[in-house]
Image (cartoon, helix red, strand yellow):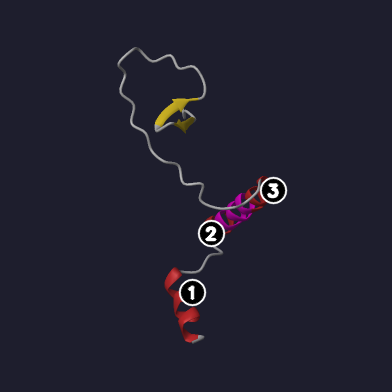
Amino acid sequence: MNALKARVTQGRLVVEEPVEFPEGTVLELAIVDPGDDLDEAERADLHSALSKGWESVKAGKGRPAEELIQKLRSRK
C-alpha cells in the first residue's frame, strides 16, 4: 500500500503530489497518529533495543510476563 500525504486547505483535503487514480476512484483515508516525539536518532536507538530484546527472547533468555508483573506488584 502506498501512502499519500495531504493537507487540509479551506476544509478540503489537498494531496501534495500528483496521483494516477482513475476519475471517480474512492479512497479511504485514515488519520496517522504521530505517536511520539522521538527524533530519528532516538527512533533508531529504540528499534535497535527492540531488535536486541527480541533476539534475546528467541535465544531463550526471556522471562514470562506473569513473573515480571508479579515482581512489579510486590514492590508496592
Q: Is residue 12 above or below residue 58?
A: above
Q: Residues within 10 Å of mark 1 (few under 14, many from 20)?
A: few
Labels 1 and 2 touching (C-beta < 8 A): no
Q: Which residue is mark 1?
A: 68
Distance Cα–Cα, label 1 vs label 2: 14 Å
**Callout 2: SS:** helix
Which residue is drawn at the image coordinates 43% and 31% (left, top)?
A: 10
At label 3, which amino acid type do we have? Ala
Q: Are marks 3 and 2 in contact (CB under 8 Å)?
A: no
Mark 3 vs mark 1: in front: 3
Sooner in the amino-acid sequence: mark 1 or mark 2 = 2
Task: Pinpoint residue 32: horizontal percent, then vertical percent.
Answer: 45, 42
Residue range of the region highlighted in magenta in the rendering: 46-54
Q: Amino acid at mark 1?
A: Leu
Rendered location of residue 51, percent (x, y): 59, 51
Residue at far right of view? 41
Is residue 1 located in the magenta-colored stretch of the structure? no
Q: Nearer the viewer, mark 3 or mark 2?
A: 3
Give the numbered dot on residue 6. Answer: none
Whole-number angstrom distance, CA of label 3 to CA of label 1: 29 Å
Mark 3 or mark 2: name the one nearer the start of the chain: 3
Residue matched to label 2:
57
In the image: residue 48, left or right of residue 57: right
The residue that label 3 is drawn on is 41
Count of marks placed on residues:
3
Q: Earlier in the sequence, mark 3 or mark 1?
A: 3
- For residue 49: magenta? yes
Report the amino acid beneath label 2.
Answer: Val
